[in-house]
Image (cartoon, helix red, strand yellow):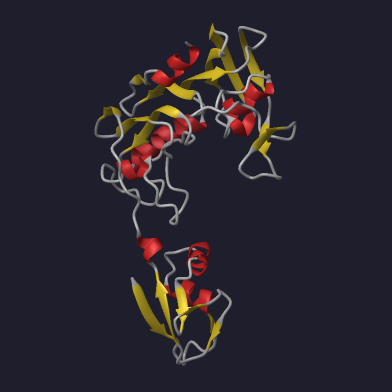
Amino acid sequence: MKQNITITEQEGVVRVDKFLSSKFPEYSRAAITKLFTLNLIKLNGEPIQPGHKLRPGTSFEYDLGPLQAKPEVIPLPIIFEDQDVIVIDKPAGIISHARGRFWQEASVASFIRDRISGMEGERGGIVHRLDRATSGVMICAKNVDTLKFLQKQFSDRKVQKTYLAITKNTPKETKASIMAPIARNEKDPKRFKITKNGKPAETLYTVLKTTEKGSLIELSPKTGRTHQLRLHLDYIGCPIVGDELYGGEYNSRLLLHAQKLKITMRNGKEVEFESKLPKHFSEYLK
């Protein structure tokens, strides 16, 4: 909604971005700056830059609409739900949570926001993340105590995760462990890389099936580094089909699926949730 505001004598000469940040402290400086790139801050009907200085008595127009919008909610498959958790069977193409107030895209977080309590923001209730292109089991917390309880298990590496992937090549060994440290690629922040200076990362794998088109591989990550499975398979010369970021050939989707998740609930009971292998995987191997 467009509104007007006037600089007072008490405020003196001010930079418009700093002025807005002081008026609306609930938004970050980066969020305020984004409004300028969207041409939503205007003086006399013309867009102005963040560093524009305004004198007392000057009125200008602003629109906080993009900051106040909520992402849409789309229905997602539920594997399990009780008073503490909701387990989602995340489809490929759906993000775990919004990347910020300007990316108001439907996500797992937006789907669960009306089912959680005491948690706000883009990541409310999100215990762990799956890449947009990865499908499968994703557990979310419905309250703060459960969130902390489950996140500690992830940080302590007590959660057992099982993934399935289809690679365009076949590993030399049918069953083995891949140990290769991972760090962010400073030349391309969206990517990660294998480097001796990275954080330790380990993945166990087992080849389940091999055809002319590729191999179906079961993966058990012992650490939880970003893009770990994708990087590790590419590292041994077996990139995941559809993973163009890390050596895989084009496909309509990344053939990586979070099949199982074994975790301990707050009542002390260990449970395992499972998601069926998407049809696209079996169809690809035919």
Query: Which of the 4 quarters of the picture holds residue 278?
Result: top left
Q: Nearer the viewer, residue 253 or 100?
A: 253
Rendered residue at 67%/21% (across/down): 179
Q: Is residue 159 visible?
A: no
Q: Nearer the viewer, residue 242 or 85?
A: 242
- 44 vs 111: above or below: below
- Looking at the picture, how far across and down is residue 254, in whole percent? 51, 28
Query: Which of the 4 quarters of the picture holds residue 74?
Result: top left
Left or right? Give the position of 168 relative to 90.
Answer: right
Left or right? Give the position of 77 relative to 20.
Answer: left
Left or right? Give the position of 178 relative to 36.
Answer: right
Rendered residue at 40%/33% (across/down): 150
Query: Which of the 4 quarters of the picture holds residue 250?
Result: top right
Q: Is residue 108 visible?
A: yes
Q: How many marks?
A: 0
- Looking at the picture, how far across and down is residue 39, in whole percent? 48, 70
- Looking at the picture, how far across and down is residue 283, in whole percent? 44, 15
Q: Nearer the viewer, residue 244 or 216?
A: 244
Left or right? Give the position of 160 relative to 206.
Answer: left
- Looking at the picture, how far across and down is residue 62, in whole percent? 41, 75
Rendered residue at 39%/34% (across/down): 149
Rendered residue at 63%/28% (across/down): 231
